[in-house]
Image (cartoon, rainbow, N blue to C red):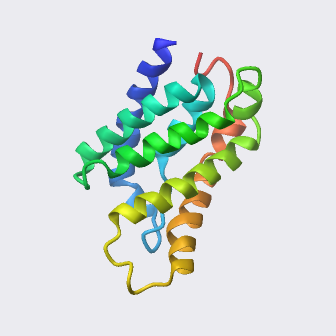
């Protein structure tokens, strides 16, 4: 079980670098995927709600410190995302959740919630746009983008890959 956490933290480091350097180039109109969220959802579905909440806290705190954003914003949203993803955890259906399209649906739902709450903390320009446009542009689209990027996990995942 501890090897899961160590491996997740080791995967976090290159994903955080990619998130901060390459993802802004892939973003359109500040809508981009959240690679750290995909990793968090994947590991929460493997280890459970408590483990996902702890990983979310660690990932969020590390991302806040690395990125230089408002301290606590990513920490709160990733912790909440790990907690909410834990409701989809079932120890009898771990492989089914990870190796099916339900992973994409979970990433979409959690990514949408994560993006909305993160934009609430980080967006200072809320007065000029309507709430529906903000919900669509800063909630649904990043969640959809993240779930599309999680597709290779569903297609190429094997038990031996992360054992």
Instruction: State which quadrant residue 118 falls in.
Output: bottom left
Identify whether 91 is placed above or below 132.
above
Residue placed at 26% from the left, 55% from the top?
A: 69
Residue placed at 77% from the left, 30% from the top?
A: 96
Residue placed at 41% from the left, 19% from the top?
A: 6
| Labels in figure, total | 0
What is the quadrant of the C terminus in the image? Answer: top right
Q: List x then y, in percent, for residue 108.
A: 63, 53
Q: Is residue 145 shown to the viewer in this render?
A: yes
Instruction: State which quadrant residue 123 falls in.
Output: bottom left
Q: List x then y, in percent, for residue 63.
A: 32, 44
Identify which residue, 30 or 52, lies in the foreground: 52
Q: Residue furthest bottom?
A: 128
Identify whether 142 is placed above or below 54.
below
Identify which residue, 30 or 71, lies in the foreground: 71
Q: List x then y, in percent, for residue 119.
A: 41, 64
Q: Is residue 18 shown to the viewer in this render?
A: no
Q: List x then y, in percent, for residue 48.
A: 59, 26
Identify which residue, 28 or 40, lies in the foreground: 40
Horizontal side of 44 relative to 64 (left or right) equals right
Identify whether 68 is placed above or below 101.
below
Residue placed at 53% from the left, 61% from the top?
A: 142
Instruction: State which quadrant residue 154 falls in.
Output: top right
């Amino acid at each position: 079980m501890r090897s899961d956490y160590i491996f997740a933290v080791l995967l976090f480091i290159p994903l955080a670098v990619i998130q901060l350097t390459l993802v802004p180039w892939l973003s359109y109109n500040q809508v981009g995927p959240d690679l750290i969220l995909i990793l968090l959802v994947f590991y929460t579905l493997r280890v459970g709600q408590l483990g996902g909440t702890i990983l979310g806290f660690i990932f969020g705190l590390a991302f806040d410190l690395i990125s230089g954003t408002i301290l606590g914003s990513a920490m709160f949203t990733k912790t909440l995302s790990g907690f909410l993803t834990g409701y989809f955890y079932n120890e009898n259906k771990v492989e089914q959740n990870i190796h099916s399209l339900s992973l994409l649906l979970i990433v979409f739902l959690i990514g949408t919630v994560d993006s909305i709450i993160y934009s609430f903390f980080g967006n200072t320009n809320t007065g000029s746009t309507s709430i529906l446009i903000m919900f669509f542009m800063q909630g649904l689209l990043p969640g959809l983008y993240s779930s599309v990027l999680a597709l290779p996990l569903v297609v190429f995942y094997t038990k031996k890959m992360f054992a």
